[in-house]
Image (cartoon, helix red, strand yellow):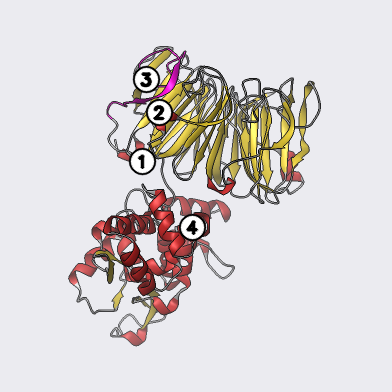
Amino acid sequence: MSLHSEMFACGYNKHNQLRVSNTLEKNNQFGEVKELEPISQIAMMREACVFLHRDQTLRLIRQGNTNKTFTLKHNVKKIVSGYRFVIVLTHEGVPYIIGKHPQTATETWEPVPFKYFETNNIFIKGCCCGYHNTFLLSLNGDVYAIGTNDQYQQLGLQKENISKAIGSDKIILKNIKQVYGGNCASCFAAISFEDELFFWGRNDKGQLGLNHKNPVSKPTKLDCNFEISDIKTICTGYEHNIILFNDGKLFGAGQKGYSGLGLGGDAVVFTQYAALKEKNVIFVALGGYHTLAITDEDEIFSFGGNYFGQTGSGTYDTITTARKIEVKNLKTFDNLKIECGPINTFIYHAYDENSQSNFQKLREISKTFDNNIHGINVHQIWIEKRSKKPFNEVKNIIETDFNKDDAETFISWAYTAHTKNYQILMKILNKLGIRDLKDIKIKDDLMSLYRDEDSKDFSILVKMEDEDEDEEEDEDNLEEIPVHKFILESRSGLFRELFETIKEDMKKIQDYSQKTIETIEKLVYFFYIDDIELTADDDPQLIVEELEDAVEYYQMGKMCNLPIVIKKIKKQFDLD
């Protein structure tokens, strides 16, 4: 089994939905899941799971040994779980639902689109779910509330005890950039484009952090003693909530046992986890009553409700203080994710669509370094793209004000978009005039690199289509496609091998794949962006046919995203 398909599960397993070798109804230790292919995401309901595989296939596993697969006409962006349903978000902005509908209470165990949004051409870019609720976020920042609104006022409509479900057309907030919930949540959060933090819903344990225990019937702004822009994510549960900050600090509020804060009573304001105070938390997941967190030191901590063993701690007792746990046979923390269901948990290696673009192995294999910072080899043009500064200026700032370990932190982030020392990274970026990591997305920098013709240092030569087969080849009969040498090196084992055999000063190499220049141009674009865009002048059938063997021919690796891109093109143009 490859590392990318390594998966473990614990907790409630009455219907064998966890697919572990131990078929007990409750499992308090993580067991290995062996039968599923590499996946991108998991969404867990109480008695069912939905898996998004890397080929865009959705797999539903539920009671009665139901095991169904679905492929949507739209490309799946994200799957989000409620208590008995899952919302499927697509790149085209059409939301689907699987399970018990929070509005109609009817059950459908195959993906069904929300007709209201499709009919009214409302593009849905995000969502969060709860116990009986869904909040869908439109492209222009409107939040639509769907579901029931009982004594906890979880829909935020300023109305009391609505026994019937609310439809899709209720807008409770505007100008919102992100919404937060959880599969058992009865309270929710949102952050506006003005960096205002709102909470609403159930609050009988003080979980909203508002310093009281009254239900909040409308979205209420939280007066914070921290910067909203420093928030990495928010998770809401049944009786406790979590805020994770960019610097790795974890805060919680709510029920004294489930919150894991180790306090003598409920926490009515957000309080830092004392047991994790010296840790840098990089990922957190919250279920109904339990929480798991991953640190940058490759540690997993868990706490909270544990009747079904869902914390994976080896006991069925409530864990009132964050406790480190071990997962037997876990080989690596690379791309490790956790999905907490209502009463169960999965740990898995998520297939990362951008893993190839992020150059995660490039610094180990590169032969094309052309400069250094503190003696650490780098590609000058890439450092310039990531820092938005001339290389010599970056080099001077880092070598003057920071040591070699600090330089390694910055360089590692430049190539992978990840860091284990957020504080040092932000100090360096601030020195470079960069205030927000969201302003320097690696994919945007790759697009900038692709468009930067002047900095391209290599060319692929492609045979012209109208060339006489018997005519002797020369450069007059070949078309040049400019490219950055280190991009070819990062994406293709074939080019890496060629670079080891040619002279260092060679600036061109011919492609002998017999593919058309149009296809090679699309492939080069894919090397940068991890995607392919077709125009009205392109022949999609020809391009798909010529790309079918590209992963193998160019030695692009098993986790290459090209097969998924080809599948998307086939779907878009209705190709067999």
Task: Name the image quarter holding residue 161.
Answer: top right
Task: In the rendered structure, find residue 313 and report the number of the disc placed on it.
Answer: 3
Q: Is residue 564 visible?
A: yes
The type of residue carrying mark 2 is Ala
Residue at numbered disc 4: 441
- The nearer-to-camera label among 1 and 3 is 1
User: Callout 3: helix, strand or loop?
Assistant: loop
Task: In the rendered structure, find residue 296 and report the number of the disc placed on it.
Answer: 1
Q: Name the dominant secondary structure of the magenta segment.
A: loop
**Where in the figure is residue 268, as x and y percent of width and height?**
60, 26
Q: CA distance from mark 1 to mark 2?
A: 15 Å
Q: Earlier in the sequence, mark 2 or mark 3?
A: 2
Q: CA distance from mark 3 to mark 4?
A: 37 Å
The type of residue carrying mark 3 is Ser
Q: Are marks 2 and 3 in contact (CB under 8 Å)?
A: no
Residue at numbered disc 2: 275
**Where in the figure is residue 381, as x and y percent of width and height?**
37, 71
First to last magenta residue range:
307-329
Q: Check residue 318 for magenta coloring.
A: yes
Residue positioned most to the bottom: 476
